């Protein structure tokens, strides 16, 4: 984890208060929380998961191995699990559970504790659902909702508020967005973890029930009430009051007025430019056009040319605006004025809710509805205000200001949720099982003729040999840490998995691919070797290694060609030297083939011929002793005789 904070995401927790549980209903053992992962994951048809330890699929004879990447894809109505492109299984949904609680499952770069279920959402997307004990969930909430530089008592106050809030919801599954609370999985540091642990089980109650303890980033100096926002009955812990601790964060929203410049366009022939012309702020104008098309302009082809006016007004008792207006100018394709020019018209939305106007001008919302100023400079409409979020309950920045002023978390909570009691919702940890699983076994190479799988593993453990989900054999590891499991011979390229089990559970698998049985090569052939030769050549098994030796001394080595020939460079050897050649493949060495070096015979020097006259009947001269002499005229032989010093022919 990195000690840093992404953009503060608590600013838009706009929540509808739900039915609450009583304290008694939540008491006892720490509950589990199930969280759909949406905020950081988005909508994906395929995701990558990476387990730090062994995970098992519940109800299936399938395991995810530690430190390997897997892919989960949506396929029809199902989800499919792949590993290295190979299909592991297809399921309507599946859930994985870690072999030890401190294992983490990484999904597209973010890691999570606990169990993880994968479902097919809308026949399009893979939706992970993370189930884990609430206290570890809260650590991932505090880590994302606050800056890590905040004070420890700010973390504690946030932990209690977040715990209280989630326990107040009557939902079996929530999500990790601002619709509930932002949750970042295994994203916290030691200080945050300790702050959550120090407030274990603590919640806020009012008249014996857990409250809906919503909160926001900044309230701009005035705390909002739940009644003003949701119309719920007035209660003593959610009322309008000044907040002297909130730093009154300022925001500005600037809306460009001109969206399409009609000057220079042929207004009589809009067909020439209509399809190529877009509004300057297409995301905003698309929302506005959707609103326009839902009314009297239904099914028309329109473009917004400018934003004429934006107004917010009718503030409530917490100075949050409740009403708003917007006026825009627009054109409709093929609707012309009396001069034949495309006609620019005006559309007004007057007296709408401030929330509607807010949505139309900015998808993420303005900072808050605490609007302090609206100015039109002719080019833009500039809206300013204070605070981030709805402003109900605790201000996170205000809480940190209180903590910096030596206020403890109980005092912070008492200020932001007055008249509530800090009580314990549960007092027992959810059981977390930590196991040290055996290491993956060592497996020796397996050939296509082997009837045993051998290797090393933890003494006394049970070893299983499998082909896919089929058990080929099992045995027990000896006290010396070796094993031998009898199997039927398997074809070359078969993938064999070996796993062991001890009292803690199963190890990761070790996989071996069966290799074709290889026999030792036959002895090579050797071409004749002379005392002046600087290479040894011959034939042997293709692609084998060739060694040329004189006794135990290696004179040279090389590799045979695909055609099974070789030529190995050596230093020339004296005649009568005994040369041995052997070859090696993966199965071992061949026998030796020997050859004795022969003496090289030199060609004789050209003979000397004495003078021959037209009367002579013999040709005489000198040549190499005991060599054969040929006398020729053209291509015809005139005579032949062996020489002895000098001989007549």
Image (spheres, rainbow, N blue to C red):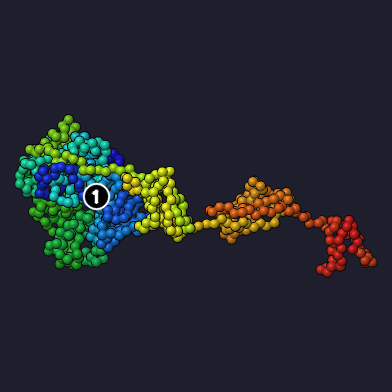
* Image quarter hosting the N terminus: top left
* Element type at mark 1: strand
Residue at image coords 21%, 37%: 197
Please determine whether, in this image, residue 336 is positioned above or below residue 587: below
In the displayed image of the protein, which residue is found farthest to the right? Answer: 615
Closer to the camera, 344 or 56?
Answer: 56
Q: To which quarter of the image does residue 126 belong?
A: bottom left
**Residue 295: x and y, percent?**
12, 62
Residue 108 appears in the picture as rendered: no
In the displayed image of the protein, which residue is found farthest to the top? Answer: 406
Q: Is residue 646 left or right of residue 601?
A: right
Residue at image coords 61%, 51%: 547
**Residue 337: x and y, percent?**
15, 66
* Image quarter hosting the C terminus: bottom right
Q: Is residue 592 left or right of residue 357?
A: right
Q: Is residue 268 left or right of residue 225?
A: right
Closer to the camera, 433 or 349?
Answer: 433
The residue labelled by disc 1 is 130
**Residue 427: x and y, percent?**
16, 39
């Amino acid at each position: 984890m990195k000690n840093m904070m992404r953009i503060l995401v608590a600013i838009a927790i706009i929540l509808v208060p739900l039915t609450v549980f009583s304290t008694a209903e939540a008491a006892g053992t720490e509950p589990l929380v199930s969280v759909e992962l949406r905020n950081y994951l988005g909508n994906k048809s395929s995701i990558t998961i990476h387990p730090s330890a062994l995970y098992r699929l519940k109800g299936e004879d399938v395991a995810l191995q530690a430190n390997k990447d897997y892919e989960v894809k949506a396929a029809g109505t199902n989800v499919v699990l792949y590993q290295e492109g190979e299909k592991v299984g297809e399921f309507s949904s599946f859930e994985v559970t870690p072999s030890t609680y401190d294992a983490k499952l990484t999904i597209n770069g973010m890691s999570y504790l606990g169990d993880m279920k994968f479902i097919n959402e809308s026949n399009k997307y893979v939706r992970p659902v993370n189930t884990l004990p609430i206290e570890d969930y809260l650590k991932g909430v505090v880590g994302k909702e606050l800056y890590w530089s905040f004070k420890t008592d700010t973390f504690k106050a946030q932990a209690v508020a977040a715990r209280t809030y989630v326990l107040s919801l009557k939902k079996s599954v929530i999500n990790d967005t601002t619709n509930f609370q932002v949750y970042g999985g295994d994203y916290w540091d030691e200080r945050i973890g300790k702050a959550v642990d120090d407030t274990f089980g603590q919640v806020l109650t009012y008249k014996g029930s857990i409250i809906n303890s919503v909160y926001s980033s900044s309230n701009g100096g005035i705390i909002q009430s739940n009644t003003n926002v949701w119309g719920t009955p007035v209660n003593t812990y959610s009322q309008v009051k000044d907040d002297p601790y909130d730093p009154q964060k300022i925001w500005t929203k600037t809306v460009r007025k001109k969206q399409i410049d009609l000057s220079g366009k042929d207004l009589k022939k809009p067909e020439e430019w209509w399809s190529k012309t877009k509004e300057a702020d297409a995301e905003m104008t698309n929302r506005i056009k959707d609103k326009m098309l839902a009314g009297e302009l239904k099914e028309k082809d329109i473009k917004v040319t400018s934003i004429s006016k934006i107004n917010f007004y009718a503030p409530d008792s917490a100075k949050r605006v409740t009403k708003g207006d917007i006026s825009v100018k627009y054109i409709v394709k093929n609707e012309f004025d009396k001069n034949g020019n495309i006609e620019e018209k005006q559309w007004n939305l007057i007296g709408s809710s401030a929330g509607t106007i807010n949505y139309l001008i900015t998808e993420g919302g303005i900072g808050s509805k605490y609007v302090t100023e609206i100015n039109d400079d002719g080019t833009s409409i500039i809206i300013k205000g204070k605070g981030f979020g709805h402003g109900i309950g605790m201000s996170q920045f205000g809480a940190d200001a209180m903590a910096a002023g030596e206020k403890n978390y109980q005092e912070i909570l008492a200020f932001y949720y007055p008249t509530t009691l800090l009580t314990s919702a549960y007092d027992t940890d959810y059981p977390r099982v930590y196991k040290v699983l055996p290491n993956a076994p060592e497996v020796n190479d397996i050939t296509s003729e082997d009837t045993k799988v051998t290797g090393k593993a933890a003494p006394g453990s049970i070893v299983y040999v499998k082909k896919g989900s089929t058990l080929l054999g099992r045995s027990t590891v000896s006290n010396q840490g070796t094993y031998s499991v009898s199997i039927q011979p398997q074809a070359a390229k078969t993938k064999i998995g070996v796993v062991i089990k001890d009292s803690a559970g199963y190890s990761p698998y070790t996989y071996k691919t069966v290799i074709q049985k290889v026999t030792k090569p036959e002895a090579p052939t050797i071409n004749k070797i002379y005392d002046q030769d600087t290479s040894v050549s011959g034939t042997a098994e293709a692609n084998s290694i060739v060694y040329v030796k004189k006794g135990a001394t290696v004179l040279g080595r090389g590799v045979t060609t695909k055609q099974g020939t070789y030529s190995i460079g050596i230093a020339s050897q004296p005649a009568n030297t005994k040369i041995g050649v052997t070859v090696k493949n993966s199965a071992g060495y061949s026998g030796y083939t020997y050859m004795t070096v022969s003496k090289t015979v030199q060609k004789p020097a050209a003979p000397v011929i004495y003078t021959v006259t037209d009367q002579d009947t013999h040709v005489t001269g000198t040549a190499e002793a005991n060599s054969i002499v040929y006398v020729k005229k053209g291509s015809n032989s005139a005579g032949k005789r062996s020489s002895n010093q000098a001989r007549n022919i």
